[in-house]
Image (cartoon, rainbow, N blue to C red):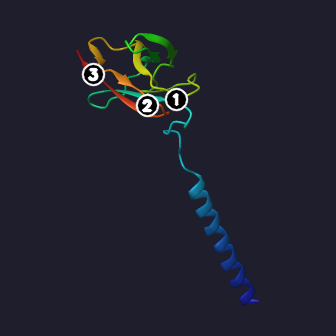
């Protein structure tokens, strides 16, 4: 009878270890990763503090830099993050500010997305 109990204890331990391993490999926190079907913008100050409540846009532009079609993005959250919800296909798009930029701050350079969905970190600098 003790062999049987020992066998059950080993079997239970093996099942428990297997369950923990499966749970650990499947329970990854992907909340900070953008889906592969969206552009994600992270807006921050030079000291890496997130900028909350700034509304951004992604725009198709012509050869002269004139905006042809713009996609508004939701305002940035507490982490300075906003995710495009209405861009159906990746393209080279100009990144711009709609509203909510803190007084005295601006984007350092013209920023364009790549022709693939990606995450872009934008740093606001003092004017």
Work out whether 22 lies above or below 69: below
Please tell me which residue lies in front, 77 or 122: 122
Q: Is 24 positioned to the left or the right of 65 in the image?
A: right
Work out how far the residue at label 3 is from the one at label 1, CA to CA, in angstroms. Answer: 24 Å
Residue at image coords 26%, 12% = 104
Dot 2 falls on a residue whose secondary structure is loop
Mark 2 closeness class: few <14, some 14–19, many ≥20 residues within 10 Å:
some
Dot 3 falls on a residue whose secondary structure is loop
Q: Is 27 positioned to the left or the right of 93 in the image?
A: right
Work out whether 2 lies above or below 37: below
Mark 3 near mark 2, Cβ–Cβ under 8 Å?
no
Mark 1 sits on what residue? 90
Residue at image coords 36%, 14% = 101
Residue 77 rendering spot, x and y as whole percentages: 46, 25
Mark 2 sits on what residue? 114
In the drawing, what numbered circle is on residue 108?
A: 3
> Quadrant where the N terminus lies?
bottom right
Mark 1 near mark 2, Cβ–Cβ under 8 Å?
yes
Please tell me which residue lies in front, 105 or 72: 72
């Amino acid at each position: 009878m003790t062999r049987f109990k020992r066998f059950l204890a080993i079997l239970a331990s093996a099942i428990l270890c297997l369950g923990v391993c499966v749970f650990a490999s499947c329970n990854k926190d992907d909340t900070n990763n953008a889906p592969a079907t969206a552009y994600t913008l992270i807006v921050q100050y030079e000291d890496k503090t997130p900028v909350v409540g700034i509304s951004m846009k992604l725009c198709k532009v012509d050869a002269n830099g004139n905006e042809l079609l713009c996609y508004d993005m939701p305002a940035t959250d507490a982490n300075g993050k906003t995710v495009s919800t209405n861009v159906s296909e990746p393209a080279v798009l100009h990144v711009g500010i709609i509203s909510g930029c803190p007084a005295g701050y601006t984007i350092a350079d013209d920023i364009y997305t790549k022709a693939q969905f990606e995450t872009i970190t934008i740093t606001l600098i003092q004017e």
